[in-house]
Amino acid sequence: MISSVLVTGSNRGIGLELIKKFLSRSQPPEKIFATCRNPEGARSEELRNLASKHSNIVLLPLDATNAESVKEAVVEVEKYLNGSGLNLLINNAGVMPRTSLDQVDGDEMIDTFNTNVVGSLQVSQAFYPLLKKSAEKNAEKPLGCEKAALVNVSSVLGSIQQTPLTFQPEKQVISYRISKAALNMLTRLQAEAYKKDGILCTALHPGWVRTEMGTERALLTTHESVTGIMEVLSSLSEKQNGILVTWDGKVIPW
């Protein structure tokens, strides 16, 4: 059983659906930390409604690009955990500018990296002690989400090997692709560094999903994607440490 989970970017799209799916489990987590930049904003209304009906949801402001905001979120999470560790951290927050190779500029690259890579790094670093504490408290369990796990939501578009298959002249999303390739490397490094602590680290491709980022042309609904993701999370083991997996459990080469 996953007793505690934190999801970034949880007020819409895949993040919001993850919160719903954790709630619908036969044994939902005791604490579901639903974080986003502005939990009180208009775009977080559905998330607030969920929290008002479920006492195990803890709404927290967390801007992954702001180190101080991340630190403040850790302090609040520690209070709610009351000495326990954090089972599962899902770095879901991300952005996707739709700029081509001849149009992308340095400012966009920096902004995209700041959210998709630096943000995930800062959040992971800050919550690492709580993940480690969970691994220590569940030392008898095998590597996986019931022990301690860090999941970075990535993309097949970050796979260098798959680029000839996924490149579309009309949809180049250059800064997004490069940032997800960097996130994949971050995940691989985290897997190597944190394995000794009993923390599993995996990159996850959610598929092409009908969200604000994925557009209405996408093949999957959030329900279909996240239903698959929940099955993948339940089955994660040492075999998936440091690799990129899809929403339906397939392995994608780096």
Image (cartoon, helix red, strand yellow):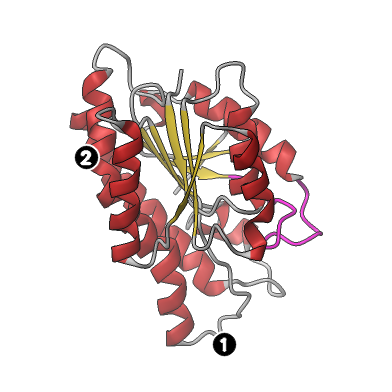
Q: The residue under label 1 is which amino acid type?
A: Asp
Query: Which quadrant holds residue 12?
Result: bottom right
Compared with 102, 153 (above or below) is above
Most distant residue in the top direction? 140
Circle 2 SS class:
helix
Which of these two is toward me, 10 or 151?
A: 10
Q: Is residue 207 visible?
A: no
Instruction: Please name the residue that numbered disc 2 is placed on.
Output: 129
Q: Earlier in the sequence, mark 1 or mark 2?
A: 1
Q: Would residue 171 appear left or right of 67 to someone viewing this image?
A: right
Circle 1 SS class:
loop
Q: Are marks 1 and 2 in contact (CB under 8 Å)?
A: no
Is label 1 or label 2 in front? 2
**Segment colored magenta:** 206-220
Q: Main secondary structure of the magenta part?
A: loop
Q: Is residue 186 magenta?
A: no
Q: Would residue 230 appear left or right of 224 to someone viewing this image?
A: left
Instruction: Please name the residue that numbered disc 1 is placed on.
Output: 102
Q: Residues within 10 Å of mark 2 (few under 14, many from 20)?
A: some
Q: Position of residue 112 (x, y in %)?
A: 47, 72
Residue at the (26%, 51%) spot, across then down: 125
Residue at the (61%, 29%) spot, across then down: 23
Most distant residue in the right direction? 217
